Image (cartoon, rainbow, N blue to C red):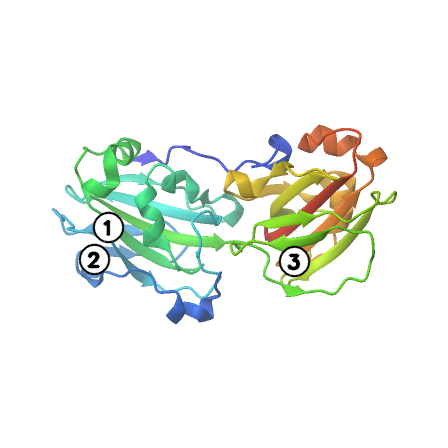
Amino acid sequence: MRRLPALVAVTALAGMGLVGCSASAASSCPTPTDSSIASVVDASGDFGSAPTVSVRSPFVPSQAGTQTLIEGDGQRITTENQLAFVDVTVLDATTGAQVIATQYPSDVASATPIVRLTQAIPSLSPMLKCVAEGSRVAVALPGDQLGAQGAQALGINEGDSAIFVFDVRKVFLPAADGADQYNADSGMPSVVRAPDGTPGVVMPAGDAPTQERSQTIEEGDGETVTADSSVIIHLQGVAWGAKTTFASTWKNGAPGQARVSGLPPALASALEGQTVGSQVLVVVPADQTDQDQQILKAPAGSALVYVVDILGTVG
């Protein structure tokens, strides 16, 4: 049995740079289900521990399908680039042999970002739509949807089908989902949002503030962020008066992860005490951006504006 290859990693913010619906909304966010999988796939064992998986082989699915084996009640996967940590066991459907398994660590923060599989096997993404945190799901992919790249990544013959059994350990918000807040401060930028949550910054007339300032644009109801928190965030950074961003996790398609205390001082100060689900606007005066230049490759000689969505914490 081989271990899952490190095809793609979630990049920490300090490294580059940067790199929907609730469980109660299951009826409006249906998972694509194929009940026939349940009759040929068995996965015994507790959620979060390596299951014993067997498949009645040879199993040649005619189409891709998903079957929920354990129903979770947490945050759901609703967008393609949403970050989720999973463990997975993969079988060659033709032979019934197990070919790959992740490590099923007790620490959820050490589980595998799902992007490691979905970037190599894009057809997995729609099969996991609307799956909730805490769920165990079996996914069957026929050989024509697995593709040559997927077969190579899994170490099975091209054209063979595969069975995946996912334990969805942690799902993060796709974007801030808190309540809009009223801010009376003048001289601050305003934030507009695209339907997917991508923020845009509208600059006010006049000069940038000469002191560090922050506003809570949306206030979430999740756990409180501390200086020691390892946070999952979306971040948009733009120089005062500029029309293009110098840093954007939204452009890269995946959020970033960072310890709050390791962020530039103004960002760290603005995030500490905030809650998961919040969106925060931060302005850093031009003469206080040394750390931003080093850590986030911010331009020198200009005040900086950040919009930060707090999507969750790890550990």
Q: Which residue is mark 1?
A: 140
Circle 1 residues within 10 Å: few <14, some 14–19, many ≥20: many
Extreme-left residue of the structure: 58
Q: Which residue is mark 3?
A: 278
Q: Secondary structure at mark 3?
A: loop
The foreground one among 192 and 212 is 192
Q: Secondary structure at mark 1?
A: strand
The picture places residue 199, in percent across and down from the top left corner, at: 61, 50
Q: Residue at x 21, y 55 (%)?
A: 41
Q: Residue at x 79, y 38 (%)?
A: 303
Left or right: residue 231 versus residue 8 is right
Checking the image for residue 37, the label placed there is 2
Real-space CA distance between mark 1 and mark 2, rounded to the nearest whole angstrom = 7 Å
Q: Quadrant of residue 160?
A: top left
Q: Amino acid at mark 1?
A: Ala
Left or right: residue 7 versus residue 266 is left
